[in-house]
Image: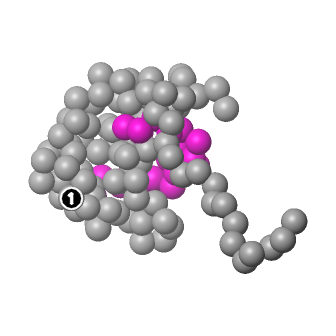
């Protein structure tokens, strides 16, 4: 085959039908303020863990809402539950309870 200097990239579409939405439902049930998040970034700006790692609460929020649980377990281990994010949230999202609920949901629903 002739090499023309280009290749076909892997498909980057998200198949929401294959994703696990049980974790998001569990988190919303146990911490209803999870739905109030507007992804302003205040939590990420004050996060102690984010200063030392690539941890980002907004990223967690998006992964949970999309149902993408592949990297969720490793991301959750980075949170130190210091509570700084809780203090600065303009919408009053209880981020500590959200993180705890995500951890519980992972233990309940993630089969990996």
In the image, the segment drawn in magenta is 64-84
Report whether 5 appears left or right of 75.
right
The C terminus sits in image quarter? top right
Q: Which of 29 and 63 is in front in this view?
A: 63
Q: Residue furthest right?
A: 1
Q: Nearer the viewer, residue 83 or 16?
A: 16
Q: Residue at the location (38% across, 24% down)? A: 26
Q: Residue furthest bottom?
A: 5
Q: Is residue 104 visible?
A: no
The N terminus sits in image quarter? bottom right
Say whether residue 72 is magenta: yes
Q: Can residue 72 be seen in this view?
A: yes
Secondary structure category for the residue under label 1? loop
- How far across and how far down the image is residue 88, in percent? 18, 58
Report whether 55 appears left or right of 45.
right
Report whether 68 appears left or right of 40.
right
- How far across and how far down the image is residue 45, in percent? 29, 67
Residue that mark 1 sits on: 40
Q: Which of 76 and 13 is in front in this view?
A: 13
Q: Residue at the location (58% across, 28% down)? A: 110
- How far across and how far down the image is residue 75, in percent? 52, 51
Residue 15 drawn above or below residue 10: above
């Amino acid at each position: 085959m002739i090499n023309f200097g280009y290749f076909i990239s892997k498909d980057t579409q998200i198949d929401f039908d294959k994703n696990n939405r049980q974790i998001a439902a569990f988190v919303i049930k146990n911490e209803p303020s999870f739905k109030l998040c507007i992804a302003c970034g205040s939590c990420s700006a004050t996060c102690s863990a984010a200063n030392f790692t690539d941890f980002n609460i907004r990223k967690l929020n998006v992964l949970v809402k999309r149902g993408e649980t592949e990297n969720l377990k490793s991301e959750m281990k980075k949170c130190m539950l210091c509570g700084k994010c809780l203090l600065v949230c303009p919408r009053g999202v209880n981020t500590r309870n959200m993180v705890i609920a995500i951890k519980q949901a992972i233990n309940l629903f993630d089969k990996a």
